Image (cartoon, rainbow, N blue to C red):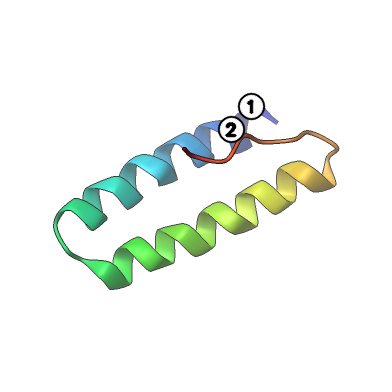
Amino acid sequence: MTAILKLISETESWRTFHKSRSNHIEAAACAIRLKALRDAMAACGQPVDKPR
C-alpha cells in the first residue's frame, strides 16, 4: 500500500513537471497513471485524496 502511495506522489510530481513545460501529452499520460493508481487504492479499500 505504501508503494502505491509513493507512486502516486511521484506521478503527481512528474505531471506537474510536464504540465509546467507545456508537455501536454506526457502530463495526460501521468493523469491516466494517477487514475489507475487511485483506482488500485480504492480497490484495496483505502481512499486517496485527490489533488486540490
Residue linked to disc 2? 5
What is the CA distance from the residue labelled 2 to the residue labelled 1? 5 Å
Residue linked to disc 1? 2
How many numbered badges does the structure rendering display?
Answer: 2
From the viewer's perspective, tell me whether residue 42 is left or right of residue 18: right
Task: Identify the secondary structure beneath mark 2.
Answer: helix
The percent position of residue 1, horizontal first and vertical second, equals: 70, 31
Q: Residue at x 46, y 37 (%)?
A: 52
The percent position of residue 25, horizontal first and vertical second, equals: 30, 72
Amino acid carrying mark 2 in the image? Leu
Q: Could you classify mark 2 by the number of other residues whose Cα lies within 10 Å: few (under 14), some (14-19), or many (20 or more)?
A: some
39 up-or-down from 28: above or below? above
Q: Could you classify mark 1 by the number of other residues whose Cα lies within 10 Å: few (under 14), some (14-19), or many (20 or more)?
A: few
Q: Residue at x 24, y 56 (%)?
A: 18
Toward the left, the furthest residue is 21
The percent position of residue 15, horizontal first and vertical second, equals: 34, 51
